[in-house]
């Protein structure tokens, strides 16, 4: 039924395993310059951790901690034990670098294989990785997991839609890994090429690397003719494979034999009530080279109460609702980009791409949303376009309580790259 027996462990056994691995992780962390200092000041040792809940004795680790101790301050092993590093995708400032031993790579591959098995991929399937390789973890992380599962793995990389289509067709690909924004772009490409995606062999798409709404998932499934499964990962926690949907598509199972997950109030640091949205905090349990304790992800989600119909016992988190540091305050209202996406993608006239711009008018911050419109709706009649503009503004106002300026643009005119979509641009002080 499962790729690994651990997926169906009884809750009591799972928590016992977490405790054993937490003790080992604390002992490992004490070898790093950063944690030996931090835990040493609190006189914490492995003996102080007798349940997963005891992780609360440890202060949070933040991205600033990683940057402030870059590059080697978190390492727990001699340098000759490390075989790879990945780094955050930021282009300015100090990146966050994560180091892996061979054991870390093997463990990570196993977790990704578990995820892929859980959505229906099997040994012998052909799997095309349409994600960027290099320092970005989504490429190699998914690649190694697919190979571990036993898939014939096609390392297509990002972009070059013509090549992607040829590979999909020639090798009768069963499953793909693709970021949501590129999936929508690829659907437009297939339409332009006169290709019916339902004539392709594929049946499964793993989508992640950027937050997206349920509306976007439904569009991907409808436009590409596949079942699309949400995933969660981040460089600091290995990369992809931290949490994944099963075939029920009812939330993402966090692999609790490899992680301790907490959800906190971002302002107070206290745990939120079950089912309440807050900031996800993660602790690694199976990493030798660079374990992290109570890492503040800044990602907003909630634990989904109750068991999953698939029978897996690992807790589920809801899709990421945004980031705690992505919140915009416009005219006194707290607004997250995901709210805008949800509203836009519910409208049949709206195409795949949009751009949110924050700008200043006088002393006031203002919001402008550029929206690509499907070709069928982008007509020359200004009365029709004005009515559509008002409709979109009204729908956004209902969702975010602020009326933004809406600018309608033709389909495929908002610039896009091969990587994660840029959804928000801050123009304050630049206009």
Image: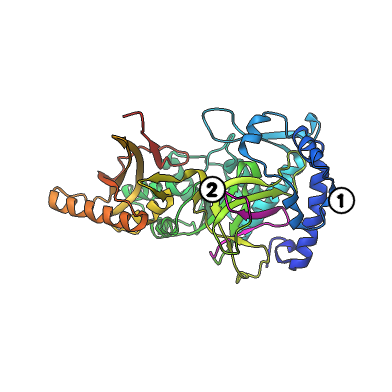
Residue 389: say if magenta. no
In-image side of 424 versus 147 (left or right): left
Q: Is residue 81 above or below residue 153?
A: above
Q: Residue 418, image x and y in percent?
A: 45, 38
Query: Is there any visible trace of residue 149 in the rendered image?
Result: no
Picture residue at 31% right of the left edge, 47% below the top: 192
In-image side of 101 versus 211 (left or right): right
The residue identified by callout 1 is: 47
- Residue neighbourhood size for the residue with mark 2, other residues' Cα within 10 Å, grouped as few (<14), some (14–19), many (≥20): many
Q: Is residue 85 above or below residue 324?
A: above
Nearest the viewer among 107 and 151 is 107
Cα–Cα gap, marks 2 and 1: 46 Å
Judging from the image, what secondary structure is the residue with disc 1 in?
helix
Q: Is residue 28 above or below residue 73?
A: below
Q: Is residue 338 above or below residue 72?
A: below
Q: Residue 151, image x and y in percent?
A: 62, 52
Q: Which mark is residue 128?
A: 2
Picture residue at 49% right of the left edge, 40% below the top: 158
Q: Which mark is residue 36?
A: none
Q: Which residues are magenta?
A: 249-270
Judging from the image, what secondary structure is the residue with disc 2 in?
strand
| Quadrant, the C terminus | top left
Nearest the viewer among 414 and 431 is 431
Residue 264: say if magenta. yes
Picture residue at 23% right of the left edge, 51% below the top: 389
Q: Residue furthest right?
A: 47
Q: Residue 41, image x and y in percent?
A: 80, 38
| Quadrant, the N terminus | bottom right
Q: Residue 78, image x and y in percent?
A: 81, 31
Q: How many marks?
A: 2
Circle 2 or circle 1, nearest the eye: 1
- Residue neighbourhood size for the residue with mark 1, other residues' Cα within 10 Å, grouped as few (<14), some (14–19), many (≥20): few
């Amino acid at each position: 039924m499962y790729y690994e027996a651990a997926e169906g462990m009884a809750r009591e056994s799972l928590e016992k395993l977490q405790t054993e691995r937490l003790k080992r992780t604390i002992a490992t962390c004490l070898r790093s310059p950063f944690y030996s200092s931090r835990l040493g000041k609190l006189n914490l040792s492995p003996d102080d951790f007798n349940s997963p809940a005891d992780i609360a004795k440890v202060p949070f680790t933040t991205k600033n901690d990683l940057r402030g101790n870059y590059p080697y301050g978190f390492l727990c092993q001699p340098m000759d034990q490390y075989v790879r590093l990945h780094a955050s995708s930021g282009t300015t400032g100090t990146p966050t670098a994560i180091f892996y031993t061979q054991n870390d790579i093997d463990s990570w591959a196993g977790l990704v294989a578990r995820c892929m098995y859980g959505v229906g991929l099997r040994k012998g399937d052909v799997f095309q990785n349409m994600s960027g390789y290099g320092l970005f973890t989504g490429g190699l992380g998914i690649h190694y997991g697919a190979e571990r599962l036993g898939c014939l793995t096609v390392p297509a990389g990002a972009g070059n839609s013509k090549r992607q289509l040829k590979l999909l067709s020639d090798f009768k690909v069963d499953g793909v890994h693709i970021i949501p924004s590129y999936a929508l772009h690829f659907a437009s490409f297939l339409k332009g090429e006169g290709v019916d995606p339902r004539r392709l062999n594929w049946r499964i798409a793993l989508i992640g690397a950027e937050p997206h709404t349920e509306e976007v998932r439904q569009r991907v499934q409808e436009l590409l003719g596949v079942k699309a499964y949400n995933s969660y990962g981040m460089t600091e926690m290995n990369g992809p494979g931290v949490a994944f949907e099963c075939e029920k598509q009812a939330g993402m199972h966090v692999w609790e034999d490899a992680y301790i997950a907490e959800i906190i109030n971002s302002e107070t640091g206290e745990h939120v009530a079950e089912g309440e949205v807050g900031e996800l905090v993660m602790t690694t349990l199976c990493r030798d080279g660079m374990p992290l304790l109570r890492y503040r992800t800044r990602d907003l989600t909630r634990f989904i109460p109750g068991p999953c119909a698939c029978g897996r016992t690992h807790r589920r988190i809801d899709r990421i609702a945004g980031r705690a540091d992505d919140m915009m305050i416009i005219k006194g209202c707290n607004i997250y980009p995901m709210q805008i996406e949800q509203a836009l993608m519910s409208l049949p006239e709206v195409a795949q791409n949009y751009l949110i711009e924050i700008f200043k008018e006088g002393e006031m911050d203002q919001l402008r949303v550029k929206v690509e419109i499907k070709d069928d709706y982008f007509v020359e009649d200004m009365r029709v376009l004005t009515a559509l503009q008002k409709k979109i503004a009204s729908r956004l106002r209902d969702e975010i309580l602020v009326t933004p300026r809406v600018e309608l643009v033709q389909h495929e005119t908002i610039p896009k790259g091969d990587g994660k979509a840029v959804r928000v641009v801050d123009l304050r002080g630049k206009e």
